[in-house]
């Protein structure tokens, strides 16, 4: 058996429990509606990810270090993470993640899947996984070639790509259960 499958099997059969975040997508959301400066669909996806990222954390084993709502000290060294507000986190996510990955040009629910991956893996890695699924050259940047192929992607194939990435991560033993729960939660949220 492949090592990452052995690790996945070990994680799935482990008796340690991990809390599950309950979120549901409103399938009636329209992408071009706007609340404040953030479009409604972007706001929803950002809130979903903030919810699963939860509040403040300072786990020494987390490569991101100190985080709140998924915003890490490693990515934003000058930001006061502990006192970060949800509104500021949403602003950062919209400007530095949503717009960077051109999520507004992605079909639902792929927009949520890629956005959440950009928060968890970084924008370039999230786009590279999308490009792998689209079967276009991987440069980590959204361009016309990627966007022309994105409508042919089955959204769950993107989540499979994320699962493979997690399975090869050196921190799988520490964070793997939470990572895989995140994938199941995000998929289930689109089916309710």
Image: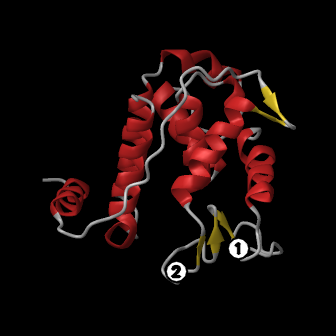
**Crowdedness of circle 1 by 10 Å Cα count: few (<14), some, many (20+)?**
some
First in sequence: mark 2 vs mark 1: 2
| Above/below status of 20 relative to 73 | above
Outermost residue on the bottom side: it is 60
Outermost left residue: 1
Residue at image location 58% in from the left, 80% down from the top: 58
- Tell me which residue sits at (68%, 72%) in the image: 74
Q: Which mark is residue 59?
A: 2
The CA span between labels 2 and 1 is 12 Å
Where on the picture, by quarter, is residue 184? top left
- Residue 146 pos. (x, y %): 62, 25
Q: Quadrant of the C terminus?
A: top left
> Residue 76 sits in which quadrant?
bottom right
Side of 88 where 163 appears, left or right: left
> Quadrant location of residue 3?
bottom left
Residue carrying label 1: 73
């Amino acid at each position: 058996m492949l090592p990452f499958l052995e690790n996945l099997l070990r994680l799935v059969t482990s008796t340690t429990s991990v809390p599950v975040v309950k979120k549901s997508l409103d399938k009636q959301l329209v992408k071009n509606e706007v609340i404040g400066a953030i479009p409604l669909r972007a706001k929803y996806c950002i809130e979903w990810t903030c919810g699963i990222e939860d509040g403040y954390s300072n786990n020494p084993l987390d490569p991101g270090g100190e985080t709140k709502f998924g915003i890490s000290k490693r990515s934003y060294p000058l930001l006061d993470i502990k006192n970060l507000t949800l509104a500021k986190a949403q602003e950062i996510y919209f400007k530095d993640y949503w717009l960077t990955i051109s999520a507004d040009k992605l079909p639902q629910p792929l927009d949520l899947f890629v956005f959440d991956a950009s928060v968890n893996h970084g924008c370039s890695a999230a786009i590279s996984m999308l490009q792998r699924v689209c079967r276009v050259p991987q440069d980590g940047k959204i361009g016309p070639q990627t966007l022309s192929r994105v409508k042919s992607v089955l959204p769950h194939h993107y989540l499979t790509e994320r699962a493979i990435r997690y399975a090869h991560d050196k921190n799988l033993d520490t964070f793997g259960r939470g990572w895989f729960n995140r994938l199941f939660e995000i998929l289930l949220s689109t089916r309710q």
